[in-house]
Amino acid sequence: MGLQNTLKALSDPTRREILNLLKKGKMSAGDIVEKFPVSGAAISRHLSVLREADLIRDERNGKFIYYELNASVLEEIMLWITDLKGDGDNA
């Protein structure tokens, strides 16, 4: 996995919007698909990329799959970006 997969996943605006939707809590795949003007197959691929990057988790409940943010990975990314940015005194 690694940082490269994470950055690739975050580079797409649709995937970033999916993450924004999931900030509010778990959502089914069908609920996510309804929010976008693209096919279910396209959203499924976006969800796969996010899952492979470990940015989201999925859980099957009956015939539905629910997705939620993996906050620990997002926190690691934020810490890395903050560290990369530095404290501003070195500019």
Image (spheres, helix red, strand yellow):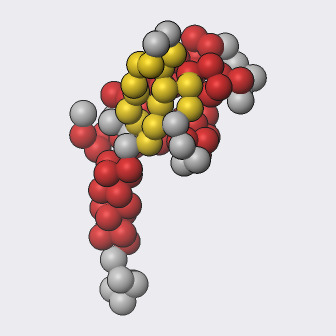
Quadrant of the drawing holding the N terminus: top left
Residue situated furthest right in the rendering: 37
Which residue is more in the foreground, 15 or 19? 19
| Residue 35 at x, y percent in the picture | 71, 29
Q: Quadrant of residue 69?
A: top left
Which residue is more in the foreground, 66 or 35? 66
Which residue is more in the foreground, 36 or 66? 66
Residue appearing at x 32%, y 48% in the figure: 73
Give above or below for 47 relative to 84.
Answer: above
| Residue 80 at x, y percent in the picture | 30, 61
**Left of 58 or right of it: where is 22?**
right
Residue situated furthest left in the rendering: 2
Residue appearing at x 38%, y 61% in the figure: 78
Residue appearing at x 46%, y 13% in the figure: 62
Residue 46 appearing in the image: yes
Residue appearing at x 40%, y 27% in the figure: 58
Residue 16 appearing in the image: no
Give above or below for 54 relative to 47.
Answer: below
Give above or below for 35 relative to 64.
Answer: below
Give above or below for 86 relative to 58.
Answer: below
Quadrant of the drawing holding the C terminus: bottom left
| Residue 39 at x, y percent in the picture | 67, 13
**Left of 52 or right of it: where is 17?**
right
